[in-house]
Amino acid sequence: MAAACKTPLDHLAPYGLGVAASRCDSCIAQPPPFGYDRYSDPKNPKTIDYNHVKKANDMLKHFVHATPLLKSKFCKKFKMSLHFKIETRHITGSFHERSAMYALIQLSPEQRLYGVFTASVGNWAMALARQGQVYKVRVTVVLPEHTRQSVVDRCQDYGATVVLSGDNVEEARTRAFKLIAEQGRVGTYLNGYDHPNVIAAAGCIGVEILKQLPETDVIIVPVGGGGLIAGIASYVKHVKPNVLIYGAEPGKSCCFAKALDNERPYKTAAERGLAASLTVPKAGENAFHTARSLIDKMVLVHDDWTARAILHLIEEEGIVAEGAGAISLGALLNIPNILPELKHKKVVCVVSGANIDTWHLRRAIDYGKAAEGRMFTMTLRSTLGREDPRNKILRVIKYLQANVITTGVEQEWLDDSKLLDTYISVVCETKNFIQANTIKNLIVKFFPNVCEFTDDTFSLRNKCFCFPGLH
């Protein structure tokens, strides 16, 4: 048998990441297994470094304006010099614009001819669709079936072919590779958080942060598959090794923190929460191997704190962010229970996206208010033939200077024992936990067995915590 000929693959030539390519007949005759992504190979992961990010930035700075770094209006409250890196002002509303542009620019002429495929929960799909329109590359995006119609419409408006398939991004990815197989395996799959070009372009955010705030002490980055934090860390840690890189990941979907603790990426159960864009079942291979030694701490953030972060950004900072964009601030809101070392530091929170529709935004705001003790819901029961307690209860609420936001009436028809009962739901706005608990205690005392209170406001608040394997 002839000796294998080692040649750098063309698609990795811009990185200088040579890959052995065997030209023996037995190797050529065997196609790769279904679903194999040569740009995200568990057996041959790529480490993105400073030079890759610098090269991407040298190209992209001519096309993409630096996004603003805004100082918080409440630095005294947080006891630190807090800044927000605003990645929400791109046309498609998230940080993915740079990565989508760079990934398409780096395609070979043959790859551009056959088009690209991807799976996404939304933000990456929209960014890739738009850049495909700009650079005249055919884009096919596979989205989970529950994806918001607004995301589907925007992808289609940018000229992408949209396919809805599966319940999550992993099932959508499987469908994308089936489409590539049906096309004769000539399409290119672009992973939105693990392709080397995607990671390198995401690192440009780190370049901008150090230019805008050279004295940065800490950068807190939202984490899903890990591409964003890998890109930022690879540049920042090379230029300023003393800058701390913290990842903020949803507690319901923490594949990256688990990969760090397990020392390799593996599939995990990923439950959707407020930070839906970060719901990924498995950390990226390249992202993990790039970032594993560069991340100083991972913080797993409960939805309570993500909701409060969304609320704070809107009410106090004038910034609209989706859950995945606000989660970096959510990690700070639990100070001093966690991260006390950030006191008096210069901290940058990356606000990675703002693609949240009005319905989900309203729910997040209500959730955040409930988590802060500023809103609660109770249900009153009124029985025919007995004294109606509504007026007295509402007078108690008024006397304690709370506000009734909404009321609603329901009547039980299916239970014979409740045919004479009417149920009135009341949503109240309060100043804080103290006022909310005062109202609850008085109503329970003077109107026993009449009202039921939801747990959203009165349950113990979950604390975010640092992943134990990373201390």
Image: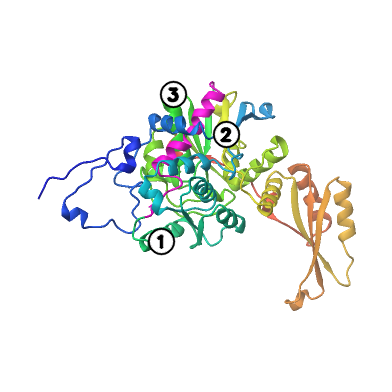
Q: Secondary structure at mark 1?
A: helix
Q: Nearer the viewer, mark 1 or mark 3?
A: 1
Q: Is residue 179 left or right of residue 309?
A: left
Q: Type of residue at label 2?
A: Cys
Q: Quadrant of residue 44?
A: top left
What's the magenta region? 187-215
Q: Residue at x 77, y 47 (%)?
A: 436
Residue 364 covered by magenta stretch: no
The mark that comes first in sequence, 3 or 2, is: 3
Horizontal and vertical percent for residue 403? 83, 48
Label 3 element class: helix
Q: On the picture, is 288 further left or further right than 142?
A: left
Q: CA distance from mark 1 to mark 2?
A: 38 Å
Query: Vertical placement of 335 versus 390: above or below?
Result: above
How did the renderer colour the structure? rainbow
From this viewpoint, is residue 296 visible?
Answer: no
Tell me the kind of residue under disc 1: Leu
User: Which residue is more in the foreground, 396 or 230?
Assistant: 230
Which is nearer the N-term, disc 1 or disc 2? Answer: 1
Which label was assigned to residue 357?
Answer: none
Q: Which mark is residue 349?
A: 2
Amino acid type of the residue tagged 3 in the rendering: Val
SS assignment at label 2: strand
Q: According to the image, label 1 marks what residue?
A: 179
